[in-house]
Image (spheres, grey):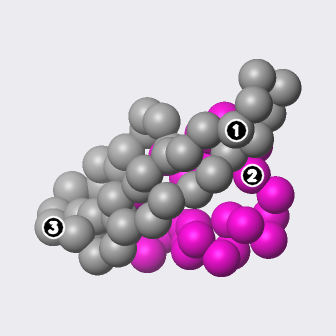
Amino acid sequence: MTDCRKLRLTDATGARLVRLVRLRNLWPSARVTWAGAWSEASAEWLSLPAEDRVKVGLVKGDGEFW
């Protein structure tokens, strides 16, 4: 675990708190990446404004994932 964050997300149904844990891929040579919720191109990340994604540290190709 390399980081943890709480995000308050607001949409048409109201606000909710989301807790995220950032993990490092211990086998980067395996070329397997997380593709579920909160993966790099997921709907969850895309629903956040770009400036919030930068604040949280969504960085592509760094061997870590939320």
Question: Which residue: 22% across, 69% down?
Answer: 1
Earlier residue among tags 2 and 1: 1
Query: Where 11 falls versus 50 (above or below)?
Result: above
Q: Which residues are magenta?
A: 39-66
Residue occupying the far left of the picture: 26
Q: Say which residue label 1 marks.
A: 15
Label 3 CA crowd tier, 10 Å (few <14, some 14–19, many 20+):
few
What amino acid is at disc 2? Leu
Q: Residue at x 74, y 52 (%)?
A: 48
Image point (61%, 38%), residue name: 16
Please give the name of the residue rendered at 28% of the width and 64% of the height, measured from the top-left corner. Answer: 23
Marks 3 and 2 sit apart, C-alpha to C-alpha, by 27 Å
Whichever of labels 3 and 2 marks the residue nearer the N terminus, that label is 3
Residue 64 horizontal side relative to residue 1, left or right = right
Placement of 47 over or under 63, stated as above or below: above
Mark 1 residue type? Ala
Residue closer to the observer: 28 or 1: 1
The dot on residue 26 is 3
